[in-house]
Amino acid sequence: MHTEKNPGSSYIAGGTNLVDLMKKNVTAPQRLIDITPLPLKEVTQANGMVKIGALVPNSDLAANDIIRKNYPLLSLALEAGASAQLRNMATVGGNMLQRTRCSYFYDTTMPCNKRQPGTGCGALKGINRMHAIFGASEQCIAVHPSDMCVALAALEAKVELQGPSGTRSIPFSQFHRLPENNPALDNTLRAGELITAVTLPAPAFTKNVYYLKVRDRASYAFALVSAAVALKMDNNIIREARIAMGGVAHKPWRLTAIESFLEGKDANETIFAQASAMATQGARAYEHNKFKLKLAPATLEEALHKASEGIQL
Ligand code: SF4
């Protein structure tokens, strides 16, 4: 867990990404501040909302009874992420702050505007199979690697922050940012700020949810494309929909136009095909990731179908 705006110091908790970055000389903080003793390891429920401490391990969160019963989409996404060993170490806050897995970012012999601003983007005309189809810039076409964050975006979580000037709470959609002209910044954290918790609104999607992750290997691989779908259904009519995709942008990518399209519609295969066909509106592919223009709609269509069937965790 670390703050990019204070490069001299980094917070560290599980260290599952930060230690890798240090070993590969991608980052070299002057000092590490171990935050693991902080009392941020609880999942609590009050006034219908749930508060998840930033230091809750991913594995504990996925198995938590409150989460499984009320926010099964989050459990499914967490279980799709990394390996069991990594999930035991990785924290909620660290998961949100993990950095892109763009191979040019990790190779210090290659140009990368995110690692070293102004050097160029090796992926733009390089091997860009894993890269973005939405929201990229000429400066950076990387994707955010988290599965958990895709579910939190769909569930409209909020991020609780504490910094030198006090506390603040921001919508999850405003936490990660697009690369624009400053890809070195992954998020909107201010200098010295720490994520203390994530809060979830009252549960509204407890049954008709699905997280579908398409990847090269069955485990410990990042998403080529993923889809988080949450539906509120009433006699096969979709009353509300929440949809976000992973592996397609520098942040979890919410598909609000498809959510609006689905609301009030009968949950059937024709509607799902029509909705999924909208999934790449505004997308732009690069030389090696054109397959995502077909994979993204196909993934969403399957996730909608699975969500409509309902799940029981
Ligand atoms: Fe660096 Fe982003 Fe380009 Fe990858 S896509 S090389 S992270 S600037």
Image (cartoon, rainbow, N blue to C red):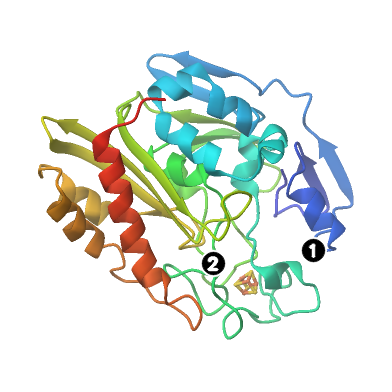
Q: Secondary structure at mark 2?
A: loop
Name the kind of residue labelled 2 in the image: Pro
Q: Residue furthest top?
A: 46
Is 9 or 157 nearer to us in this picture?
157
Question: Is residue 300 or residue 174 the one in the foreground?
Answer: 300
Mark 2 to mark 1: distance in Å?
18 Å
Residue 194 in sight in this render = no
Q: In the image, ligand 1 is in what quadrant?
A: bottom right
| Vertical order, 111 against 188 (above or below) | below
Residue identified by numbered label 1 = 26
Residue located 63% across and 48% down the image? 97
Instruction: Give the residue type that dot 1 points to.
Output: Val
Q: Is residue 33 above or below residue 256?
A: above
On the rendered image, what quadrant is the N terminus found in?
Answer: top right
| Number of the label disc, if any, that sits on residue 179 | 2
Q: Secondary structure at mark 1?
A: loop
Residue 177 location (% of width, % of height): 51, 57
Indicate yes or no: mark 2 CB to ligand 1 under 8 Å. Answer: yes
In the image, residue 44 above or below residue 235: above
Q: Residue at x 50, y 75 (%)?
A: 137
Query: In the picture provided, is 84 more to the left or to the right than 237?
Result: right
Q: Residue furthest right?
A: 30
Residue 103: % across, % down: 68, 69
Give neighbour class at mark 2: few <14, some 14-19, many 20+ (Cα, 10 Å): many
Indicate the quadrant containing the C terminus: top left, top right, bottom left or bottom right.
top left
> Closer to the camera, 116 or 233?
233
Farthest residue to the front: give it. Answer: 218
Label located before the other in sequence (2 or 1): 1
Q: Residues within 10 Å of mark 1 (few under 14, many from 20)?
A: some
User: Residue visible at 61% across and 25% down?
Assistant: 60
